[in-house]
Image (spheres, rainbow, N blue to C red):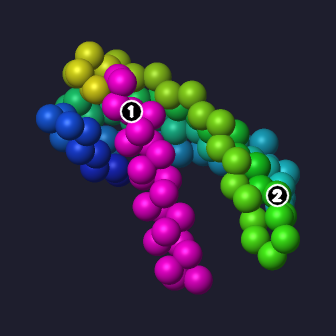
Amino acid sequence: MQLVVALAAITGTYEGTVVLSEKMPPTSYRLTGEGQGRPGFVNGNAAISLRPEGETTVVDVSAVIQTRGAIARLGQRLIGGVSQMMMDRFFACLQSKL
């Protein structure tokens, strides 16, 4: 995978891998990723569960992210908010396509 991230004054491209594991369709799975780029290294995993609620589906995400390098020194406190924003954008894009 390749991901371009702009986090405050830190902008960079990460190259890495993403793996789906612990798959229990259609209720849950684990997403594990690691990447590196000029701003540093990022490793993380997320437990994702899907549950019906009326006519909709609720997505619960519990994630842990570890960073090293400039991104860790300068942007550590911003990562949680940026991660939430990126997930919101992803699901808004997915919803517009459906």
Q: How many marks?
A: 2
Q: Going by the image, does 17 lie left or right of 82?
A: right
Which quadrant would the C terminus be assigned to in this image? Answer: bottom right
Give the residues in magenta. Answer: 76-98
Asked whether the viewer can see residue 77, the reply is: yes
Separation of marks 1 and 2 at Cα, in angstroms: 26 Å
User: Residue at point 41% right, 39% down?
Assistant: 81
Q: Using the image, determine if residue 60 lies above or below residue 44.
A: below
Q: Amino acid at mark 1?
A: Ile
Residue 20: which disc? none
Judging by the rendered image, the residue that carries numbered circle 2 is: 51
Query: Residue 61, percent across and down?
Result: 65, 44
User: Residue at point 48% right, 62% down?
Assistant: 90
The secondary structure making up most of the magenta span is helix
Q: Going by the image, does 95 lie left or right of 22?
A: left
Query: Residue 11, percent across and down?
Result: 19, 40
- Callout 2 crowding tier (Cα within 10 Å): few <14, some 14–19, many ≥20: few
Residue 64 position by quadrant: top right
Judging by the rendered image, the residue that carries numbered circle 1 is: 79
Q: Amino acid at mark 2?
A: Arg
Query: Residue 58, percent across and down?
Result: 73, 59
User: Residue at point 23% right, 44% down?
Assistant: 6
Query: Residue 75, percent across and down?
Result: 28, 26
Nearer-N-terminus badge (1/2): 2
- Callout 1 crowding tier (Cα within 10 Å): few <14, some 14–19, many ≥20: some
Q: Going by the image, does 95 lie left or right of 52?
A: left
Asked whether the viewer can see residue 16, the reply is: no
Q: Using the image, determine if residue 92 lies above or below residue 69.
A: below
Q: Which SS class for mark 1?
A: helix
Q: Using the image, determine if residue 36 lies above or below residue 25.
A: above
Asked if disc 1 and disc 2 are in contact, CB closer than 8 Å, the reply is no
